[in-house]
Image (cartoon, rainbow, N blue to C red):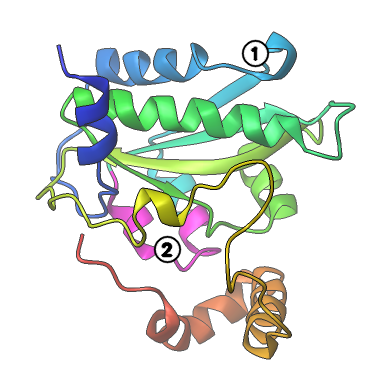
Amino acid sequence: MMDVFEAIKNRRSIRRFEDRPVPEELVRKIIEAGQWAPSACNRQAWKFIVVDSKEVKERLLKETTAHFVGKAPLLIFVLYSNRTDNLEYKDHLLSAAMAIQNMQLAAYSLGIGACCVNNLPVKSRLRKILNIPRSYDPVALLCMGYPKAVPGPLKRKEDLDGILCKNSFSFQGDYPGFDMKLIVKRGIRFIYYRLPASLKKLLDPVARKFEKKFDT
């Protein structure tokens, strides 16, 4: 049995997959791992949409710049009921995130590569494509498949003492000021999400130049 710390440290986000399907029994095991995650007030209000339809994938690809999504053999959308009274901390998003991490660790232990994606169509359009009611939020997409290659662990950006303090926030230099670059990027992303698919297609060559590059 794989050690949990081994899985946590060696799991990588995989974006290049072999051209073969993930067996149904493994798909069910991965989703079951998500189902066993903790959830706020033990609501367990997850829903999972498995996408294997070429037509649905094509509709999704028209709305996203995460182009590797189209080459993933398996897509799993993670939804969670947004009928929470804790809007301050949005506990439905926390509950979904815990399920997502369980699923990625389970996939890794089964030899399946996974990547969590949130560069997706604006939620109103995603709801139309997947027929999602407004009482559920699409939180993220998990792209999965057998990896073409698995990169080694990446060094952490800080050592443990650099991210740990006691009793109050006492980190030095972690008070960013006015960030015009971030404001501009947020504005561009807000507008881009809401463009019609036909216009996104025209802008696709430009969008690809700004898409973050990865080794896998």
Left or right, 71 with reference to 158: left
* Residue 204 locus on image (x, y percent): 46, 81
Amino acid of disc 2: Ala
Answer above or below: position of 207 versus 136: below
Q: Is residue 61 magenta?
A: yes
Residue 127 versus residue 174: which sits nearer the camera?
A: 174
Residue at x 53% of width, y 60% of height: 119
Residue at the disc numbered 1 = 44
Secondary structure of residue under mark 2: loop
Residue drawn at (44%, 57%) of the image: 162
Circles 1 and 2 in contact, beta carbons < 8 Å? no
The magenta stretch is 59-72
Q: Residues within 10 Å of mark 2 (few under 14, many from 20)?
A: some
Q: Which quadrant of the structure image shows residue 155? A: bottom left
The relative height of residue 136 versus residue 4 in the rendered view (above or below) is below
Disc 2 target residue: 66
> Looking at the figure, which quarter contains the C terminus?
bottom left
Quadrant assignment for the N terminus: top left
What amino acid is labelled 1 in the image? Gln
- Where residue 3 appears, as percent x and y from the top left, is 19, 19
**Occupied quadrant, residue 209:** bottom left
**Whole-percent x and y of residue 29?**
33, 13
Q: Which picture quadrant has residue 174?
A: bottom right
* In the image, farthest residue toward the left: 149
Precedes in sequence: disc 1 or disc 2: 1
Task: Answer above or below: position of 88 versus 84.
Answer: below
Total numbered labels placed on residues in the image:
2
Q: Secondary structure at mark 1?
A: loop
Q: Residues within 10 Å of mark 1 (few under 14, many from 20)?
A: some
Q: Which dot, 1 or 2, sits closer to the camera?
A: 1
